[in-house]
Image: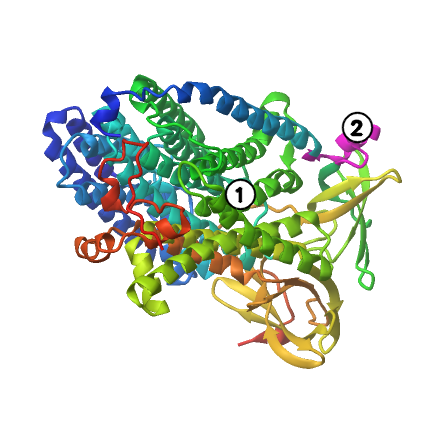
Amino acid sequence: MSEQSEHTPDPSPRPSSRRPIAIVALLAVIGTFGYLMIGGVEENLVYFLTPNELLAKGTKAIDRPVRLGGQVVPGSVQWNAESLDLRFRVTDGAKEVLVHSTGAPPQMFRAGIGVVVEGKYNRAGVFESHSLMVKHSNEYRAPKAGEGQHPERIDKTLIRS
Amino acid sequence: MSVYGIVAAVFGLTRQRPAWVTSALQAVYVNFALLTISVGAMIFALVTHDFSVGYVAQVGSRATPVFYTVISLWGALEGSILFWGWVLAMYSAVVVYSNRTRAGGLVPWSAVALLTICLFFFILLVGPADPWALVSPTPLDGPGPNPLLQNHILMAVHPPLLYLGYVGMSVPFAFAVGALLSGEIHSADWIKLTRRWTLSAWAFLSLAIIAGMWWSYEVLGWGGYWAWDPVENASFMPWLTSTAFLHSVMVQERRGMLKLWNVNLIVGTFLLTILGTFLTRSGIISSVHAFTTGTIGYYFLAFMALCIVVSLVLVAGNSEKLRSDGYLDSAASRETVFLFNNLFLTGFTLVVVLGTLFPLVADAFNGAKVTVGAPFFNKMTIPICVALLFLMGVGPALPWKAATPAQLRAAFVPPSVVVIVIVALCLLSGVREAYAIAAFAFAGFALTNNVREYVIGIRARMKAHGEAVPVALVRLVAANRRRYGGFLAHMGVIMVAAAVTASSSFRFEREGTIKPGQTMLVKGDLSVRLKTLWGKDEPQRQVVGADVEILKKGTVIGMLDPRMNFYRTQEQPVPTPAVRSRPNGDVYINLMAFTPDGNSATLRVILEPYVPWIWVGGMVVAFGAMVSAWPVSRRSARRVGYAVPAPAGGVAGSGGFPTPAMSQTNMSQSAAPTLPTTSA
């Protein structure tokens, strides 16, 4: 790797005979990866859609992983604390989609709030969600005068000093 | 702010006059000193709540504890760029100082490259990310840092480690550019320097990734540590390519092959750090790391384009010097294993790059909002990980050049027995998932051969020198730290791989709403009981917590207090899960919801076996890398390095790596054995 090697390039005939094999092997492996990737990405794309867009896709949207974004329709929330069964409707102003999920909703979940649910739309016309996120403003700002305190989160009697 | 202007001008001038090399190198120190002052001034401004400074007005708050106020230095865009510049300046100063006696153009040219990268960050600091912009009128108070970033102590650990790792990758790049510009690219010297710097940056990056996983696990409340989030991928991509480099560089040092490839890996690693910064800082991907949407993304794109063009021109112009001196002797050799290692690691990188960038490309082309789900990454990368584990077992046991049938037997038979035992154990205990079984089996395979290298070396020393086991172990590692540090890093990676497999395959989750005093069954004889719900007012937030007892067979074995933090400046509460860690796994409880009257709480209890071993494994990786990278002192080199040739070399027939001192001797005769070997 010093001066020497620069002046006397390797005279051996073997590299030239072996290199093509190595190149072919490399190309084969890279090709396989390329193929796998193209196939894999297509299957695993998760589209972000609004209820209107989801319904417009028709049967193409059924049983495909989708992230559905919209607002919780007031009065549509049905929550069964025993069976952890949650049903509500999501709207984008134009169309509504019925969403079903299991598990307690996040603390912030309420009618009118923006949500993103991830799951699949099934043939029965219900969006089976496995993940429910409340969309909130990520902005954090200084409290303005007069709103230094939030409304009580928990009953005063439970506050420890 | 004028500080930056002066610094930029100073080195801008010196840069154009290479004759003033000494002065240029001194500018590196000045650069570092001025940036240190600047960072110090910013911390002072933060701590004294000087809200006339733009950055303080953005992240400061009188209610925030001092500790989080100080670390909010890297809690938002401008401060993080300032901190980045400071780390880079520090590295530059260390590079120049530690090589002050070195002759030749390598270091000055590398310094030029480093200062140019620094200049880019100065441009950001005076342009789109100016932390010192004056705010008028001066606000009385600020919003405080992002709640997620003031919720856990790891916020003080993860970002600095990440910067040390991420920015550290600029140094190998600078060396590569320096070597190409100074014409020292054909010397074996620059690559050794580069290897050591890459190794230490790699160690920091490994720790940073692990710390990031840990933070995500402890703070985000979903009970996981890796989600193939673009942010995680951004840190992982350069890790993969630098790992590839650390392996392929050995082939260059030993056999004079893969020179061009190695330069490309160094350049690629650096570009991936810039790409990662672009992804996380430009705001095109929403995450806790994306602080703002501004014009800063275009700066990164332009800088990346510049780096690509410069590297391409330099590499193409020196292609003759980057020719290979050696060739592959046999398929059954360590070189071949390294070749496949590199192939899989680059393949891995490609998968991650593709999965990360695909949504951006899709959005740009047809406006579709898509994400590439975790299933894609898992499906693509798990087979690669299994293959890499296999190679990790094969590589250390195979010799350079060509293995004899006996060596092949020694390399494959013992670990194969382990594989069979593990598969049988998995099947007996009811594990049916093929990938989990394969991962465990090959982790065992790799572990066997890496431990075996230690055992063989220790035995040889005990025999030759009559040393006790601990003495033999210490001296063995001291005699060839690079080799045994590497194996130690392997063991850490194996631990992480096995722990990730176990925790993801055997994860169990239960959710339920219970009243105080009620008990909820989790799994088997494990249950949880809600004691009370409580609240607490703190200056910057209100905390709501649940005291939860963990019961095993009806007796209390522990207590956890998952919380929900309501920061006064943000609507969304920040969950704070509570974790009970034991070597055999974690009990992870998250407070999902509660009624304000305190009459019920919804808890999510997650059982994750063996998770702590991920963190331990990460530390072992970094420790192994440090063992390898720590400079050899002259005295100890004389004492052990020369007196005792690596005993494992001959015994295992696997040819140790040359010690640094040895590799300086002539290695160009690739056909002749260069290592001293002893036979048992």
Question: Viewed as shown, does residue B39 lie left or right of B105?
Answer: right
Q: Which chain is home to disc 1?
A: B
Q: Position of residue A29 (x, y in %)?
A: 57, 28
Question: Viewed as shown, does residue B138 lie left or right of B193?
Answer: right
Query: In the depicted view, which residue is nearer to us: B78 or B475?
Result: B475
Say if the magenta span includes residue B226.
no
Quadrant of the rendered image containing residue B188: top left
Residue A57 image label: 2
Query: In the depicted view, which residue is nearer to us: A157 or A122?
Result: A122
Query: Label 1, label 2: how many angstroms apart (C-alpha)?
Result: 42 Å
Q: Position of residue B485 (x, y in %)?
A: 37, 53
- The answer to whether residue A139 of the structure is visible from this angle is no
Judged from the image, the secondary structure of the residue bearing numbered disc 2 is: loop
Label 2: how many Cα within 10 Å (few below 14, some 14–19, many 20+): few
Q: Which residues are magenta?
A: A44-64
* Residue at 46% over, 53% down: B450
* Residue at 26% over, 27% down: B186
Q: Quadrant of the N terminus of chain B?
A: top left
- Which amino acid type is shown beneath numbered disc 2? Lys
Say if the magenta span includes residue A57.
yes
Q: Which is closer to the viewer, label 1 or label 2? A: 1
Residue on which disc 1 sits: B388
